[in-house]
């Protein structure tokens, strides 16, 4: 007989039907973070950038002001002892990059911060990619995503004055002594009038693995070959782009990629702390930038410089910043591309022409 | 494989069903969990998400082939028309979504200009041109259809339990592999 059982189903049977459905819903809600309003999620991170700097449809939620560049990387095979990644052999790898200023405001005057940034995407011949987003600082400001987020909150404009509350910033700084090396650098550094003269570091620690399977923790920097002919004093609001165009009109700009190899005990999870100065360094090749274009129409606009996109031969350490950056950059990228595509529910990006 | 019992699903179909049930629930939770996390969890979950999603695509194709060779047992003859219709519609929706979700994930990364890496040096070719509008649409679709899949799955699970515990009509048993005492199709 296939007809339903003649006795009326007891209440407990209905409970057994409904309970698993509710349980799964509850697990979904928990996993998605709906039950924990204080969990730091990419969404909350990006909302905080928007609280601090407003919504500028189509633009990055941080490092909003920038310019696209392109060129290539010429490997010299010397870093092959460190990493088997194909671009470190004696080969040429195309690069699309972006120079930028930190912060969510696309109108940040160039003289208002000493921080300059360079992001690069290497497209390897084997289809793999290396993406890195770097700063000209010697170290990062903080060690953890949580501290970075609290720093953003401390810098949020006050509801009454529209300006950040100095007391909150001071309280944050006092609670984060790890900030000292970065703050000392920022205080001592005059904002440069050129992207070309800056020394950009990945700051986070990564592992590199060579063809024999040996693994080392490293950090890297791109060391400029351009001479610092910076005028003294603060640069004009938009001096950096003009300087870049002018320099490129005169010829390519070059940086050398230098790896610093950690020794046992050097912290890999503290981007705010420098490693001792005597660590072994290996020059891996030369970055050559040959042209630039505005970020509204240039090839860097639609690139997410997610620092966890690595070729075979490079990998993540226990540094907590790269995963947080990957998650936050993806959410920023999701929003700005949705705005560019004019998806319903998103403020439309301004047309670029 | 010989399978003469017309009251239960073919053993291979059952194996695929429960394997994929576990994999798809896991994928929904992994997906929702990784986009709500800024810790190292974000990266290791993503490292599972991509290969497991592609595995689901391959399993779904296999499953449709198995289904053609070994059609499922019929629903109970006395099932109300509307319920029978809902059962068929939800099954095809589930098949559509378990094929669409991985394809959209793969196409979305392609359109976003990302390398589609599956770990262990494995990399898939792009299946869509690098295009921002396409990326934006696919990225939104990956979220919306994930929720659609979650809701369809919940309805499906509720219905299965309803058949098993309230109607006790052998439908749940046919997927667990317990033979019905009498067949619905005689
Ligand atoms: C948890 C800490 C961090 C968060 C939440 C964060 C957040 C962001 C966001 C949301 C973007 C915009 C991404 C996009 O839309 O494509 C961005 C860009 C950028 N970030 Fe970070 N960031 C963090 C740490 C760092 C660190 C440690 C560095 C340097 C070592 C860095 C360097 C950059 C650079 C250079 C860019 C511009 C990339 C480009 O030109 O597209 N960030 N960041
Ligand atoms: C059955 C298959 C799949 C299911 C059920 C699934 C489910 C999900 C879910 C629920 C999310 C979170 C969406 C949100 O809340 O916005 C997600 C995100 C994502 N999925 Fe999938 N997915 C599947 C297959 C794939 C495949 C095959 C790939 C790539 C090869 C992929 C790549 C991604 C990526 C990259 C994200 C995160 C995007 C971001 O951070 O912006 N998915 N997926």
Image (cartoon, coloured by chain):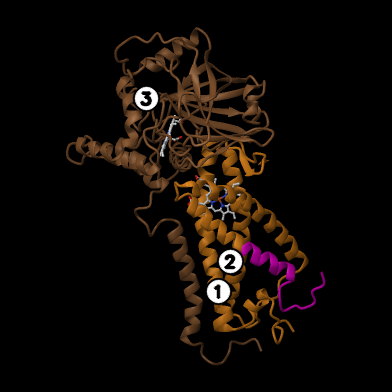
Task: Residue A108: tell me if it is visible.
Answer: no
Q: Which mark lies nearer to you, 2 or 1?
A: 1
As measured in the structure, the alpha-carbon distance from the residue carrying label 2 to the one carrying label 1 is 10 Å
Can you say which quadrant of the picture contains the N terminus of chain A? bottom right
Chain letter, disc 3 residue: A
Q: Position of residue A198 (x, y in %)?
A: 43, 18
**Which secondary structure, mark 2?**
helix
In the rendered image of the structure, the colour used to display chain B is: orange
Tell me what residue is drawn at x 51 percent, y 87 percent.
A9
Q: Is residue A187 left or right of residue B83?
A: left
Chain letter, disc 1 residue: B
Asked if badges 2 and 3 are on one and the same chain, I answer no
Tell me if label 2 and label 3 are in contact, CB under 8 Å.
no
Q: Which residue is mark 1?
A: B159
User: Is residue B10 highlighted in magenta?
Assistant: yes
Q: Which residue is mark 2?
A: B90
Q: Is residue A207 above or below residue A77?
A: below
| Range of residues picked out in magenta | B1-21
Tell me if label 2 and label 1 are in contact, CB under 8 Å.
yes
Quick one: which chain is brown?
A: A
Q: Position of residue A201 (x, y in %)?
A: 46, 26
State the image quarter where residue B23 is shown: bottom right
Label of residue A115 in the image: 3
Q: Position of residue A305 (x, y in %)?
A: 50, 33
Q: Which mark lies nearer to you, 3 or 1?
A: 3
């Amino acid at each position: 007989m296939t007809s339903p059982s003649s006795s009326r189903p007891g209440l407990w049977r209905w409970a057994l039907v409904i309970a698993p459905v509710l349980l799964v819903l509850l697990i979904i809600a928990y996993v998605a973070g709906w039950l924990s309003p204080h969990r730091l999620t990419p969404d909350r991170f990006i909302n905080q950038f928007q609280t601090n700097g407003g919504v500028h449809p189509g633009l990055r939620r941080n490092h909003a002001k920038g310019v696209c560049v392109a060129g290539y990387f010429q490997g010299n095979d010397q870093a092959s002892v460190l990493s088997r990644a194909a671009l470190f052999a004696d080969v040429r790898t195309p690069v699309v990059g972006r120079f930028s200023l930190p912060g969510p405001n696309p109108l940040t005057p160039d003289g208002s911060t000493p921080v300059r940034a360079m992001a690069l995407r290497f497209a390897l011949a084997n289809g793999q990619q290396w993406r890195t987003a770097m700063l000209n600082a010697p170290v990062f400001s903080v060690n953890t995503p949580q501290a970075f987020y609290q720093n953003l909150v401390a810098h949020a404009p006050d509801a009454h004055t529209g300006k950040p509350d100095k007391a909150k910033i001071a309280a944050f700084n006092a609670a984060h002594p790890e900030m000292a090396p970065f703050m000392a650098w920022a205080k001592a550094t005059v904002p440069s009038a050129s992207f070309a003269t800056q020394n950009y570091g990945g700051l986070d620690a990564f592992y590199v693995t060579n063809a024999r399977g040996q693994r080392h923790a490293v950090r890297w920097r791109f060391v400029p070959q351009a001479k610092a002919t910076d005028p003294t004093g603060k640069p004009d609001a938009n001096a950096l782009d003009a300087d870049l165009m002018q320099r490129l009109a005169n010829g390519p700009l070059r940086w050398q990629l230098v790896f610093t190899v950690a020794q046992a005990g050097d912290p890999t999870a503290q981007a705010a702390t420098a490693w001792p100065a005597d660590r072994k360094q290996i020059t891996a090749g030369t970055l050559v930038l040959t042209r630039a274009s505005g970020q509204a129409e240039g090839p860097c606009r639609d690139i997410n410089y997610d620092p966890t996109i690595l070729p075979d031969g490079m990998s993540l350490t226990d540094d907590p910043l790269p995963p947080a950056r990957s998650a936050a950059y993806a959410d920023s990228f999701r929003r700005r591309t949705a705005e560019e595509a004019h998806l319903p529910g998103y403020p439309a990006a301004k047309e670029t022409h | 494989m010989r399978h003469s019992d017309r009251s239960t699903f073919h053993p291979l179909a059952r194996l695929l069903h429960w394997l994929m049930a576990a994999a798809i629930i896991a994928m929904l939770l992994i997906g929702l969990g990784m986009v709500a996390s800024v810790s190292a969890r974000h990266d290791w979950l993503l490292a599972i998400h991509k290969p497991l999603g592609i595995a689901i695509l391959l399993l779904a194709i296999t499953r449709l082939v198995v289904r053609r060779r070994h059609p499922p047992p019929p629903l109970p003859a006395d099932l109300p028309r509307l319920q029978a219709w809902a059962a068929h519609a939800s099954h095809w929706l589930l098949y559509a979504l378990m094929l669409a979700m991985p394809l959209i994930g793969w196409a979305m990364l392609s359109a976003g200009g990302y390398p589609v890496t599956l770990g262990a040096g494995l990399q898939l070719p792009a299946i869509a041109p690098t295009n921002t509008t396409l990326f934006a649409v696919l990225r939104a679709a990956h979220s919306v259809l994930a929720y659609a899949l979650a809701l369809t799955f919940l309805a499906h699970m509720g219905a299965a339990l309803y058949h098993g515990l309230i109607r006790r009509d052998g439908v749940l048993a046919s997927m667990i592999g317990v033979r019905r005492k009498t067949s619905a199709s005689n």
